[in-house]
Image (spheres, helix red, strand yellow):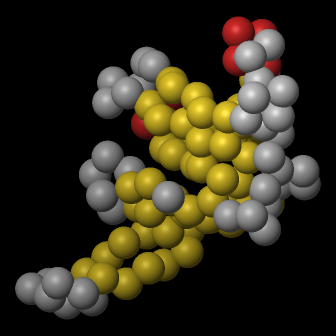
Amino acid sequence: MDFYKDSQMLLTGAMDKTIKIFNLSRTFENSNKYELKPIKNISLTNLPILTAKFNPSNNEIIGTGLKKYILSFDLIKETFDKSAPSFITSRLDGRIKSFAKSSDDKLLAVYGHN
């Protein structure tokens, strides 16, 4: 789960192999209540999502799940890219469980099973 940098969108990833993006809007101008409006539903064929985050500097979503690769989804082109760098996969026998990214979107820390 992640908020876009302007906090107007919410991203969720789930074990049902979907990534969903919602628009957040106040129900009334001076209210503290918000309404979630679905914007996009991205279905994945082979990746239950454990962690998903926006990467605004590259206009993409990054996701990890029960596999040994990192998935990125280009929000402009609407295309997927799988990345399995050897420095990650050589250290993991199992799968990537989670990740964290730096505030400048340049670094990615990965946590997985050995």
The quarter of the rendered structure image containing the C terminus is top right
* Residue at 51 percent of width and 26 percent of height: 109
Q: Is residue 75 left or right of residue 83?
A: left
* Residue at 30 percent of width and 82 percent of height: 34
Quadrant in the picture for residue 41: bottom right
Residue 2 seen in the figure:
yes
Q: Estimate the x, y position of residue 35 in percent, counting from the top left.
A: 37, 84
Residue 82 seen in the figure:
no
Q: Is residue 69 left or right of residue 53?
A: right
- Check the image and report above or below for 81 versus 19: above
Quadrant in the picture for residue 82: top right
Q: Estimate the x, y position of residue 25 in percent, counting from the top left.
A: 32, 76
Q: Is residue 106 left or right of residue 59?
A: left
Instruction: State how many labels appear.
Output: 0
Give the residue at the far right of this rendering: 45
Q: Estimate the x, y position of residue 110 in percent, counting from the top left.
A: 58, 29
Q: Estimate the x, y position of residue 76 in percent, counting from the top left.
A: 61, 40
Quadrant in the picture for residue 12: bottom right
* Residue at 82 percent of width and 34 percent of height: 94
The foreground one among 94 and 9 is 94
The foreground one among 100 and 34 is 100
The foreground one among 76 and 12 is 12
Give the residue at the far front of this rendering: 114
Give the residue at the far top of this rendering: 87
